[in-house]
Image (tube, grey):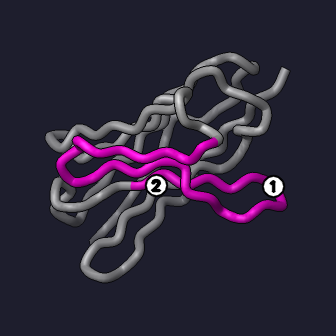
């Protein structure tokens, strides 16, 4: 059925870049908005970025605006998060999310660690 699988996390130095991917399956990917969330240790899960089904509208949390870019490739059923100018405070588990047929789906997350 519906499955979201994140990849691309890892260790990166401050100022570095990373691209996360979320491979989706089990639903008509192009019909749905896709979201990236993140959760830092001891913190609440927060919304990072949203991309609409058309791909023409994106929204970002203030903390990442200008540094992160969300995009999607409907032919590959994949949503991406390009992360530039990374800061230590970006360290978190990043999750892919979408609401499909009235149910909220989550990936298992991929860990991003920004440290010197």
Find residue 16 and report its horizontal and vertical position in percent: 65, 17
Q: Which quadrant of the figure has residue 24?
A: bottom left
Q: Which mark is residue 33?
A: none
**Residue of label 1:** 41
Q: Is 42 contained in the magenta span? A: yes
Find residue 28 and report its horizontal and vertical position in percent: 16, 62
Label 1 crowd bin: few (<14), some (14–19), many (20+), radius 10 Å: few
Q: Which quadrant of the figure has residue 41?
A: bottom right
Label 2 crowd bin: few (<14), some (14–19), many (20+), radius 10 Å: many
Compared to residue 82, the image places residue 78 above or below, namely below
| Residue drawn at the location 28% of the way across and 40% of the way down | 72
Q: From which residue to which does the magenta span run?
A: 35-62
Find residue 53 and report its horizontal and vertical position in percent: 21, 54
N-term mark: 2 or 1:
1
**Residue of label 2:** 96
SS at circle 1? loop
Find residue 10 and report its horizontal and vertical position in percent: 65, 32
Compared to residue 115, the image places residue 48 above or below, namely below
Q: Quadrant of the C terminus?
A: top right
Q: Is 116 contained in the magenta span? A: no
- Which residue is outermost to the front? 62
């Amino acid at each position: 059925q519906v499955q979201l699988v994140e990849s691309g996390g890892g260790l990166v130095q401050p100022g570095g870049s990373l691209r996360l991917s979320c491979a989706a399956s089990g639903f008509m990917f192009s019909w749905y908005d896709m979201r990236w969330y993140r959760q830092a240790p001891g913190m609440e899960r927060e919304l990072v970025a949203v991309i609409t089904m058309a791909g023409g509208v994106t929204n970002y949390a203030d903390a990442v605006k200008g540094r992160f870019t969300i995009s999607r490739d409907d032919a590959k059923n994949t949503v991406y998060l390009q992360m530039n100018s990374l800061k230590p405070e970006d360290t978190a588990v990043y999750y892919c999310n979408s609401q499909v047929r009235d149910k909220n789906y989550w990936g298992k997350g991929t860990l991003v660690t920004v440290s010197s």
